[in-house]
Image (spheres, rainbow, N blue to C red):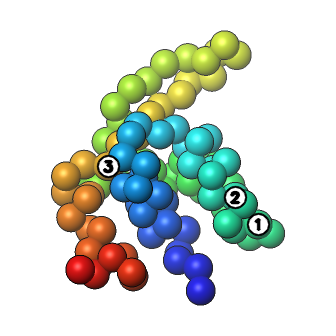
Amino acid sequence: MKLPLKTRILEYAIEENKPLSAEEITEALKKEYEGERFCNYKNIDTLLDAYCGVGVMKATDMYFDDKGKLVVKYQVTKFGKDYERLIPGHES
């Protein structure tokens, strides 16, 4: 059984342990959630903003790409890493 997308985003960011953009996370997770309409850039970007709002993640870098699009890199905070024990399979 798949984790809810919101939980999987946090798990993925903890596993990668580096700043990630919404596009990078979307590309990585869309294979796992193939055919699921909610797994898209817009929803993942919204969830990342929500995580930042509660201190689970933070924006660590912002820049404009070659096409002039704003890219924001997010990283899990220590507070966010404390949530790992609540993710199924990470209880210990």
| Residue situated furthest right in the rendering | 35
- Between discs 3 and 2, the one toward the N terminus: 2
Q: Report the residue at 72% width, 60% height from top.
A: 31
Q: Tag 1: residue type?
A: Glu
Instruction: Decide: is 24 above or below 84.
Output: above
Q: Tag 2: residue type?
A: Lys
Q: Nearer the viewer, residue 13 or 43?
A: 13
Determine the image quadrant of residue 84: bottom left
Q: CA distance from mark 3 to mark 1?
A: 25 Å
Instruction: Provide residue 90's location: percent of width, then percent of height.
Output: 33, 76
Label pair 2/1, CB-CB below 8 angstroms:
yes
**Which mark identifies residue 30?**
2
Which quarter of the rendered picture does the C terminus lie within?
bottom left
| Label 1 crowd (10 A; few <14 / some 14-19 / many >=20) | few
Q: Is residue 90 left or right of residue 66?
A: left
Which quarter of the rendered picture does the N terminus lie within?
bottom right
Instruction: Provide residue 52's location: percent of width, then percent of height.
Output: 33, 48
Q: Nearer the viewer, residue 44 or 34?
A: 34
- Between discs 3 and 1, the one toward the N terminus: 1
Instruction: Provide residue 18's location: percent of width, then percent of height.
Output: 39, 40
Q: Report the residue at 56% width, 24% height from top.
A: 70
Tell me the SS state at disc 1: loop
**Residue at the disc numbered 3:** 76
**Residue at the disc numbered 1:** 34
Whether residue 89 is visible, yes or no, is: yes
Q: CA distance from mark 2 to mark 1?
A: 6 Å
Q: Nearer the viewer, residue 1 or 57?
A: 1
Instruction: Provide residue 25's location: percent of width, then percent of height.
Output: 57, 48
